[in-house]
Amino acid sequence: MTMLSKRKIKCFVCQKESEQDIVLSTSSVGYADLDFRFPPLKRYTIEFDIQRCPNCFYCSQNISKGIDEVKQIITTEKYKTIIISDLDEKVASFLASAEIYTQLGKTALAAIDIVYCTWIYDDRGDVESAKLCRILASNYIKSAIKNGKQVGTEEGQSEQLLIDVLRRAGMFKDALEQLEQFRRKKIISSENRATFHKIMDYEENLIQKKDVDGHTIGEALNIN
Ligand SMILES: [Zn+2]
């Protein structure tokens, strides 16, 4: 069961308090999607994974925390452009948070924020915006991989995410190239290798079928 609440949070940047939605508890049962979107019930609370200060517009997973550089970043034209855009407010908040991470050189964390935007657009049924966000996310993930930064905690997760994001954006040729590159790398430790090969075989099949839908890791492993 998911329990939501509202709590007054003091903003790290401007010190003003605002009421924010908080997830007190939730659960995850089953397998995540191939792009690591959580299984239910946590799947349905992604919009609460971002907060926005209504006073200074600082956007973060937790606006009570931050580092001093953030205070300057949120005053830049680029940041303000994202905030005042006519994008969905949650999407704009995640993109604003991604801009902060980008300016701090944390490309992998920026990529995750952009992947969140793809999920929000999926939920809104906005296929075209979800696709554009996936193309944007793929560029961030590529950049993170190039700079030796992992998206996620386990070896191979960045590549798995990249391949799924490209597939779901309909970038099948690029997805297949990344998949072949990933197979050639053979970086996966022996305990995870069989699992990753299964997932890659499943992805290859989806790419060949030009399937852009969401699928779970459980499906790839033939579990459900
Ligand atoms: Zn603030």
Image (tube, rainbow, N blue to C red):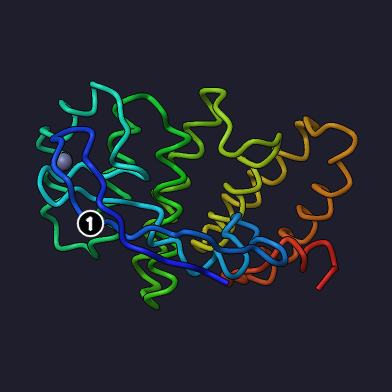
The residue drawn where x is 23% and y is 21% is 68
The residue drawn where x is 9% and y is 37% is 77
Identify which amino acid the numbered label 1 is placed on: Glu
Find disc 1 in the rendering and name its residue.
19
Horizontally, residue 118 falls left or right of residue 189, namely: left
Total numbered badges shown on the rendered structure: 1
Q: Is mark 1 on a helix, strand or loop?
A: strand
Q: Residues within 10 Å of mark 1 (few under 14, many from 20)?
A: some
The residue drawn where x is 40% and y is 39% is 110
Quadrant of the displayed image that contains ligand 1:
top left
Quadrant housing residue 10: top left
Which percent across, then down, holds residue 145? 56, 31
Instruction: Depth check: give the residue in front, 198 or 67.
Output: 67
The residue drawn where x is 36% and y is 70% is 128
Horizontally, residue 127 falls left or right of residue 194, namely: left
Please state, as top left, top right, bottom left or bottom right, where the C terminus lies in the image.
bottom right
Instruction: Depth check: give the residue in front, 101 or 18.
Output: 18
Please state, as top left, top right, bottom left or bottom right, where the N terminus lies in the image.
bottom right
Which percent across, then down, holds residue 193? 86, 41
Which percent across, then down, holds residue 113? 40, 47
